[in-house]
Image (cartoon, grey):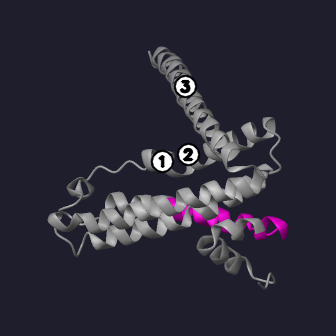
Amino acid sequence: MVYDMTPIQWLKHVIFHPLEGYEDMRWKKQGSMSIAIVIVFLLLVAQVVNQRMGGFAFNMAAYSDVFNIVPIITQSVIIYIAWVVSNWSFCTLLDGEGNMRRVAIYSAYALVPYIVCMVISTIMTYALTLDESIWSSAIYYVGIGWTAIMIVTGMKACHQYSYTKTFVCIALTVVGMILILCMFVLLLSLFQQVYVFFYTIYTEIMYRVRS
């Protein structure tokens, strides 16, 4: 095995050989944060494509005039950030060897199969009928399965855990993500109430001044 590879070659190596790829990448201290950021951006783009550009028969709602990108950002970028923060937090308590940068990179690399299969599945909706939707769904779920395998092997290599401890870590990470997202929603609600409060005061003052 030749380890003198470019960042893109490392990404390809990890995707097609996740078990040894992540271990090799950790041993050689490889992995690009820039590529990880691009992958997360592509995840956002793929989510938009999936929800707004699918075949009419498969996604009639995509052709409505109303489009809100906030839920899509939450389903992609916010959940990714919550995963990274939660995983790093719990693994620090469980003596994991990975740092936040490594968790972010390994997790982003694992998203590539999901992104690719989601886009392929969306493109297939233009050529398939509803009776043949099983094929596009199959591609989509292959991407999810492939990404899940990469997440497990990536976190195992990142923190140098056994498989049992890796699954425990992932379960705790999911719990932590739920708590983080709940706190995020509460903070948004709080900021909205503060904004409404000050805006109401401002409106009342301006009304008094003009009177």
Q: CA distance from mark 3 to mark 1?
A: 17 Å
Report whether residue 40 is seen.
Answer: no
Q: Nearest the camera: 205 or 188? A: 188
Instruction: Give the structural element (helix, strand or loop) at label 1.
Output: helix
Q: Which residue is mark 2?
A: 79
Q: Is there CB contact under 8 Å for labels 1 and 2?
A: yes
Could you tell me residue 10's position as x and y percent? 71, 76
Image quadrant containing the N terminus: bottom right
Magenta residue check for 39: yes
Could you tell me residue 151's position as x and y percent? 61, 56
Number of residues whose C-alpha sits closer than 10 Å to that of mark 3, classed few (under 14), some (14–19) or many (20 or more): few
* Left/right of residue 98 with respect to residue 194 in the rendered view: right
* Left/right of residue 142 with respect to residue 62 in the rendered view: right
Could you tell me residue 207's position as x and y percent? 45, 18
Q: Which residue is mark 1?
A: 75
Tell me the kind of residue under disc 3. Answer: Leu
Q: Nearer the viewer, mark 3 or mark 1?
A: 1
Q: Nearest the camera: 187 or 183? A: 183
Q: Is there CB contact under 8 Å for labels 2 and 3?
A: no
Magenta stretch, main secondary structure class: helix
Q: Nearest the camera: 147 or 39? A: 147
Report whether residue 143 is seen.
Answer: yes
Instruction: Give the structural element (helix, strand or loop) at label 3.
Output: helix
Q: Earlier in the sequence, mark 3 or mark 1?
A: 1
Q: Which residue is mark 3?
A: 186
